[in-house]
Amino acid sequence: MSVQFEANELKQVQTKESSSLALRIFRGGKIGFAIASGEGGLDTLVDMAVETSQFGSLANFQFPSQFHQDSSKVCIFDSEVGDLTKERMIDIGKELITQIRAHTPDIICDVEVIKRTGSISIINSQGGSGRYDKSFFGFGLEGIVVRDTDMLFVGDSESSCRVDFIGINDLAARVIWQLEMAKEKAAVSTKRLPVIFTSNGVASVLLSPILLAFNGKTVLEGASPLKDRLGEKVFDKKLNLWDDATVAFRVGSYPFDDEGVPSQHLPLVTNGIVTNFLYDLRTAALAGTQSTGNGRRVESGFPNPTISSLRLCQSGGDVSFQAMVEDIKGGLIVEQVMGAEQGNVLSGDFGGNVLLGYKVENGEIVGRVKDTMIAGNVYKVLEELLGIGQETRWVGGILQTPSLYCPRVSVTTKGG
Amino acid sequence: MAATFAFIRVKSYNRGVRNLIAESLKGHSADYIEIHFEESQATSIVYRGKRLEEISRARNSGGNVRALVKGSWGFVSFNSLDGLRDKVALATEEARLASRGPLKLFSMEAVIDKVVPQLKQDATNVSLAIKKELLDRYNDIMLSNHKIQSSRINYRDNKKQRTFANSEGSYIEQAKTDLSLRLTAIAHDDNEIQQAGLSLGSNGEFAAVEELHGQAREIARRAVALLSAPQVKGGDYTVLLDPVLAGVFAHEAFGHLSESDFVYQNDNLQKVMILGKRFGGKHLNIVDDPTIPNLRGSYRYDDEGTPARRTYLIREGVLEGRLHSRETAARMGESTTGNARALNYLFPPIVRMSNTYIERGSASFEEMLGDIEEGIYVKDWYGGTTSLEMFTFSAGEAYMIRHGRLAELLRPVVLTGNVFTTLRNIDAIGNDLEMNQGGGCGKGGQSPLPVSDGSPHIRIRHCVVGGR
């Protein structure tokens, strides 16, 4: 269920109910797959799976005969989510908009407040079966301030499996901070500059290439820049990265993945050294290793190695945000980049227009930059960091990260 | 000129569904109600390197009810038509929770119609064996180049049977097919990884994905060539865009800004987007047209039952129109354009583009190239995105231009700019319009919606190109 505000007013209330059934079969040594929702019956599902199995890839693995994880150990269900009324959700949206408009009266806000409950059941012919319930609660705000042809976009979102894990005031405070920092306009010139990626900035710019590189499939086909670097130091020694599907009440968590493999706390980078890649059953079998419990079905497809909850330096780093800013003589803070994933993501490249970012001059944030592009390579940027922020936060519910202070990123602006 | 549409219409409706909908609408208490119901089937084939990664079939059915009360909407989606009357009541009750100003939708005559696409060879009827054999061949070609480390193939086709009815008496059944294919070759050399790709699609016509052997070979060759290509130095350049990338520009940079749901409640943006305002030179015409036959963004009625029509967004450099749903048209006092589209039954229709393109100009490619002392020729695309005012898009292929000639191949580049400035900076439009069917559009969580875009070659002065 969701309530949606458009241009500061409640526009729409939605209720969605859906269920689907996915079937994977081994037939004649090959894999078949089909998915169905709505009316149509089981027969069609079986027929479709059989049809695809004629051409499917080799069935090279076994489904687990037991789902070891006790599904009550990973907390991802909050009964209060179900009890949350539409009226309360509407009040949350109104409160958010009121707080933001008290700061900037001419801002136009779109807000969505969402709650969801669902259950997942898996059964296989090896005798394995399991079921769990999951809840979701989240809200997000996008604000636009238009002055003549100048547009400023601000916004943030919060989500968790638990109602009381996230707060309106935190979100409002962050958006107000963005508005405050963006009050003045400032210009940087075309050169390499020190850049602080805020938690949002890390998610917006650095996440996609990293996800791709740690995916066991990319590694297996030889297209990951990390493929031969297991056990090697690739990143700054201060850098630690885990995938953790067991973390309580985070939206990416689960007791077992969509193939019935138990979830775990999986180190990907330890003190800068690459330690693991993400695997599902099939990819693991091809690579001669074990599934890491990351076989997840996304939309209508097969299970694929997919992150659950990613935690970068979860205990935070060594520098406060303020100290990083004060350290910069001339540089940039990046919150949101448009089109960052459009470059050659496989090789770790990023590049795009800084949709929300601020100029730092002599240790102070002086205003928002426009017409500015950044470009770089994740592996070069994360090879040596000037600092890791003390404070971490969860972005989009799935990535916990501090701010990262990087020495030199290429910045291009209009007019040089 | 009336557009001809390659659809035949046969009036034999699904009487069961039609009666059920009519029954459930009886005695409702909303200002307006619409009901969608949809049945779809899809086939997906994915390769990763030499391995067939996934071959799957899907069948989906479901629907939704949308209710309007005093200017606000309730929306209920479901998998089963059971209890449709209760769903109408729930959507109405939800709409009452909201509290916007009253709204009378842009007035429309009720339509009763059935639309069936007519395809020479409907991809959804082609056997899996034929599809797989064809894709195997393309994959083999790409992988036969010894510097190609891996490949990606994503093939998808689907067929949808959609039923629309509203409380004003409209009842429309429309069938639509869609097909998309992306081929990617990944080259590897020491520590370098580069890729090149091809995206295409069709309205379900299978021929669109046949006979691509030469292009598969070319993609592999280009990916390998990129390994030794230099990175462009970032800066301000004159850029020449090929029809594919210029089409993405038309879609991203201007198309989204023409979607009235961004504008209708934003007074400041309305002042920017005043009809009659000049945005570019007299040579610039940008059109959205769902009535062009047989493109991916073509349709006869949108998802509010509004007949499709051609809309000039910019005519001779001046803002002439924008894209509307019945709500945005009514709220802005303009005419509806038939651009309310929903990805599927899980979403309400929102204002979307269809087939968006820059009209043909008069310059030849050689003329446009010849005038450039130093610049970049950018072709093909990885993607594009916009924040209304600013856009960014990535070229899949780029070459330096020196002294009016094409020079060395470059690593893929990202272009960015301010929409308004960039439109004014288009100083030449080619005479070679082409439509690109390889894209899908995302907005409001509804992605990828089948659209197409197009353009002739265009030349832009002072465009920011990212590099390092």
Image: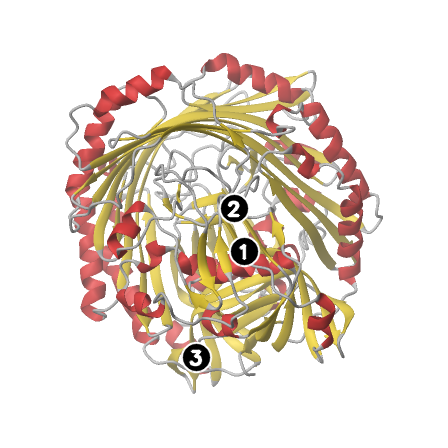
Q: How far apart are marks 1 and 2 (CA)?
A: 11 Å
- Tell me the residue that label 1 is attached to: B357
Q: Which residue appears at 84% of the width and 43% of the height?
A: B144
Q: Name the residue under label 2.
A: B451
Asked which quadrant contains residue A370, the reply is bottom left
Q: In this figure, which residue is indicated by the disc labeled 3?
A: A359
Nearer-the-camera pick, B105 or A390: B105
* SS for callout 3: strand
First-in-chain label (1 vs 2): 1
Q: Which mark is residue B195?
A: none
The residue at 52%/60% (across/down) is B250
Is residue A383 in view?
Answer: no
* Crowd band around label 3 with a 10 angstrom C-alpha radius: few (<14), some (14–19), many (20+): many
Of marks 2 and 3, the one in the foreground: 2
Residue A180 visible in the snapshot: yes
x, y percentage for residue B338?
39, 45
Q: In this view, does A233 lie above or below B69?
A: below
Q: Give the residue type that dot 3 points to.
A: Lys
Q: Which circle, 1 or 3, is nearer the viewer? A: 1
